């Protein structure tokens, strides 16, 4: 696998040229990560339940990336996705989990279906994907797992109870995986963004005054862009982060400082 593209883009220092990367989630943040890995000359398999997003992303990437439409809440489906990526790519060096949903409601209004849906999409998919990829990575003796958590895993945002619970659980799950798999050369970390403009947040941010009010809570004075998340993800996925494991890296313009 040549390193020219990575050299042209100044990303060769990450050593991701030819890396076999499975990205779960082709939404705003998953797509930004896919584009950044592509610029670093990595090889990509991307899974999402929405085939249109997968098609759109693979057209933009212009490389032979493998698109795998799948519902990632189903453990059997997840095992098939990871097996397919492993077989077509010839291994999996990196897993990025960028799948998630949110339903903003007060605690007293959340019904059982909503609670369950958020936990299965956000947390269960992260567990089953990491478990299946971790099996491959521990046996091959190296691997990087990066899970997109959220500042909601730490802060008590109103109307975020199920989402916050899923992200807090992701952080602790990630720490246990990091501890169990460190002896096998596998690192597991989370990246926790503040508000970033993607489809997940757009409708909410477009409502009267929301964008302005949220920006005021960020010491940097603004919301983030998807590209500002992909750099930290690539770092954690790279050989430069070989001794970094079990961390939640906040990418939030200082939101968790105040
Ligand atoms: N955008 C933000 O401000 C922000 C902030 C903090 C954390 N996050 C987290 O980042 C991750 C990615 O968010 P995003 O902003 O890219 O959201 P997004 O809505 O743009 O993308 C989420 C993707 O998940 C996919 N998905 C949902 N359910 C699925 C399922 N059952 N099986 C397979 N795919 C499924 C969707 O099709 C979509 O492509 C999520 O975990 C989210 O919680 C986002």
Image (cartoon, rainbow, N blue to C red):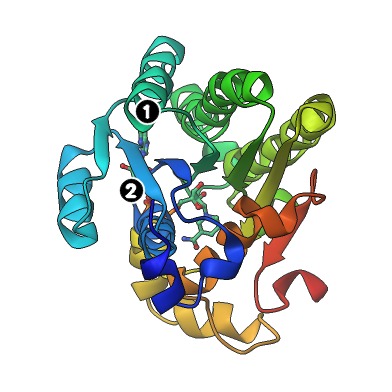
Residue that numbered label 2 is attached to: 26
Q: Are marks 2 and 1 in contact (CB under 8 Å)?
A: no
Element type where label 2 sits in the image: loop
Q: Residue furthest front?
A: 2
Q: In this orientation, which residue lies closer to the viewer: 21 or 148?
A: 21
At 65% across and 18% down in the image, what residue appears? 139
Query: How many C-alpha atoms fall within 10 Å of the one at disc 1: few (<14), some, or many (≥20)?
Result: many
Q: In this orientation, which residue lies closer to the viewer: 34 or 93?
A: 93
Q: Is residue 191 left or right of residue 36?
A: right
Residue 104 image position (x, y, % from top left):
49, 50
Total number of numbered discs in the rendering: 2
Q: Is residue 161 left or right of residue 198?
A: right
First of labels 2, 1 by sequence position: 2
The quarter holding residue 54 reads: top left
Element type where label 1 sits in the image: helix
Residue 102 image position (x, y, % from top left):
47, 46
Asked if disc 2 is less than 8 Å from ligand 1, the answer is yes
At 15% across and 45% down in the image, what residue appears? 52
Residue that numbered label 1 is attached to: 85
Residue 91 image position (x, y, % from top left):
47, 28
At 82% across and 50% down in the image, what residue appears? 243
Query: Cα distance, mark 2 to mark 1?
Result: 15 Å
Q: Is residue 160 above or below residue 240?
A: above
Q: In this orientation, which residue lies closer to the viewer: 187 or 90?
A: 90
Query: How many C-alpha atoms fall within 10 Å of the one at disc 2: few (<14), some, or many (≥20)?
Result: many
The answer to whether one can see residue 23 in this image is yes
The answer to whether one can see residue 155 in this image is no
């Amino acid at each position: 696998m040549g390193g020219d593209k990575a050299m042209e883009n100044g990303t060769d220092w990450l050593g991701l040229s030819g890396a076999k990367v499975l990205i779960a989630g082709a939404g705003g943040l998953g797509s930004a990560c896919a584009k950044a890995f592509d610029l670093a000359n990595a090889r990509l398999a991307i899974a999402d339940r929405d085939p249109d997003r997968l098609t759109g992303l693979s057209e933009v990437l212009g490389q032979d990336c493998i698109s795998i439409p799948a519902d990632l809440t189903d453990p059997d489906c997840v095992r098939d996705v990871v097996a397919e990526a492993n077989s077509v790519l010839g291994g999996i060096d990196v897993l990025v989990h960028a799948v998630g949903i949110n339903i903003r409601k007060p605690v007293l209004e959340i019904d059982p279906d909503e609670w369950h849906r958020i936990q299965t999409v956000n947390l269960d998919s992260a567990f089953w994907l990491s478990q299946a990829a971790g099996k491959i990575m521990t046996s091959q003796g190296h691997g990087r797992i990066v899970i997109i958590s959220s500042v909601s895993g730490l802060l008590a945002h109103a109307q975020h109870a199920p989402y916050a619970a899923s992200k807090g659980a992701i952080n602790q799950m990630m720490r246990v995986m990091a501890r169990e798999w460190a002896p096998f050369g596998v690192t597991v970390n989370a990246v926790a963004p503040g508000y970033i403009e993607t489809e997940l947040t757009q409708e909410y941010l477009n409502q009267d005054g929301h964008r302005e009010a949220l920006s005021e809570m960020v010491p940097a004075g603004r919301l983030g862009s998807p590209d500002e998340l992909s750099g930290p993800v690539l770092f954690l996925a790279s050989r430069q982060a070989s001794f970094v494991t079990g961390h939640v890296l906040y990418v939030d313009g200082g939101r968790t400082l105040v």
